[in-house]
Image: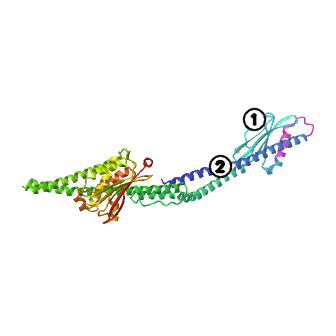
Amino acid sequence: MKFSIKLLLWTIIVMAMALGFSGFYFVNYVFESSLNREVGQAMDESSILSFAFETAALNVPAKYSVLPDSTVEEIASNLERSGRSASRLIRISGEEKNILYASDGFGADERLLMETDERTKSYRVIRTDTGFYVHTSVAVNTLDRILYLETMKDVSEVFAERETGFSLYRKVTLIMLVIGTLMMHFIASFLTKPIRLLTRATKRMAAGDYEYRARQVSSDELGQLTAAFNHMAGALEENIGKLEGEIEAREEFVAAFAHELKTPLTAIIGYADMLRSHKLDEEKSFMSANYIYTEGKRLEAMSFRLLDIIVTKKNEVEFQTVSVDSIFDYLRGMFGVDKKREFYFACDEGTVYVEVNLIKTVLVNLIDNACKASEEGSAIEVTGEAYEEGYLFSVRDHGVGIPKEEQHKITQAFYMVDKSRARSKNGAGLGLALCAEILRLHYSELEIESEPGEGSCISFFIPAKEEAQDEK
């Protein structure tokens, strides 16, 4: 069942109960007030009649020491005739509560009479075949006799008014419920509109439309829920976009990896088959074995690089404070023996908070790429500059350079700007991808400045120990 229907039904139930109880209380309150007024009048009339009876008894001739029954009947008859316009019914009973006189139509039983004594004045509301009456009973002391005067006052009109009130209120309640139902239908539809919009949005998103947003139609709690839902949908769309990008990158990675494997494996298989199936002279045998060795080394380097990337993505590194001089001493020892190029190493004194072997790997890869991008005899500059916030490493070459539109792609695995040049120097396009992963662990990234034909400067900034710990 829809929420708006539930809201409508519960509202109707509450309205019906509220109108029912309030109507019952109101009609009964009016009825009780009217009935109490009629009872009060009946008791007052009973007192007046008893006083009139006593007065009439005092006017009886003195020859009677005790009021005779015949005189009682005569007085009662006179009292009844004097009150005909008020539909008054009376009954007179003797000391033994035997009936001496009763008006025509006096249909009350004797239960109230039996409960009445000389000191009490009592009443009750009774129902007879002809209607509802207030039945009163009071003792009258006159001429040494104790008589009992009973009256019946017709109050059927009060009960009829109550029935009329209930009937009218039922009609009013029914009309109010119909009107209230129509009003609450529109109100419930209005209040639940944000929920319907959210439901539509969730269905659209479940169908794959992640750009769809729910329309915010209010600023209350449901409006805030809509805003929160849209914010969540935006975050979800962003995450899905990232996942799709990662999936696409992974597919490209697999395709590139397969392609990179194909080239060296084809050469290895071809030259191995030539050595296996043909009898070659010494020079051709050496050339074939050299091709196999070279391509095998390239596969080995590619495997190690891939393994390094996988390891660095696990974030399992231990940082320590090391001097920059020790890092540059390592680089001088590795590349200083290369006579094909001119290397310039210069650094400011200082320390860095790093995983030293990984940072050495980054610098070695950057220098190696600079060598591959440069002609023999060109200069390669490796510098280090100390700042208050951290330390800046830079590797500059004067080689072929990198086009601006290619610069954002060079950290992708297997991406090479000049594939033929890179393969000729055993490149696989994994070095900068590995550098990017290592620098990510150090809260840093590669900065590239390059112009085609003028060379490149690739740098990265290692934050100071305090800032690196804050990043964690």
Q: Residue placed farthest to the left in the image?
A: 279
Q: Identify which residue, 469 or 313, lies in the foreground.
A: 469
137 or 91: nearer the eye? Answer: 137
Q: Furthest residue to the bottom?
A: 453
Residue 471: give x, y in percent of width and height: 43, 49
Q: Is residue 311 above or below residue 340?
A: above
Answer few, some or many: residues within 10 Å of disc 2's Cα (few below 14, many 20 plus, some between 14 and 19): some
- Secondary structure under tag 1 reads helix
Q: Identify the residue under disc 1.
A: 115
| Residue 138 in magenta stretch | no
Counting residues from the N terminus, which is met first, the one under dot 1 or under dot 2? 2
Per the image, the residue denoted by label 2 is: 24
Of 111 and 46, the residue lying toward us:
46
Q: Quadrant of residue 76?
A: top right
Q: Alpha carbon of mark 1 to alpha carbon of mark 2: how far?
A: 33 Å
| Residue at x 81% of width, y 44% of height | 44
Q: Which residues are magenta?
A: 60-79
Counting from the top left corner in percent of width and height, residue 281 is at: 7, 56
Which residue is found at the position 75% from the left and 35% from the top? 115
Its colouring scheme is rainbow
Percent across and percent down for residue 48 are: 84, 44
Disc 2, SS: helix
Which kind of residue does numbered mark 1 sit on? Glu
Question: In screen coordinates, is 234 left or right of 224?
Answer: left
Q: Quadrant of residue 62?
A: top right
Residue type at mark 2 is Phe
In the image, which is nearer the foreground, mark 1 or mark 2? Answer: 2
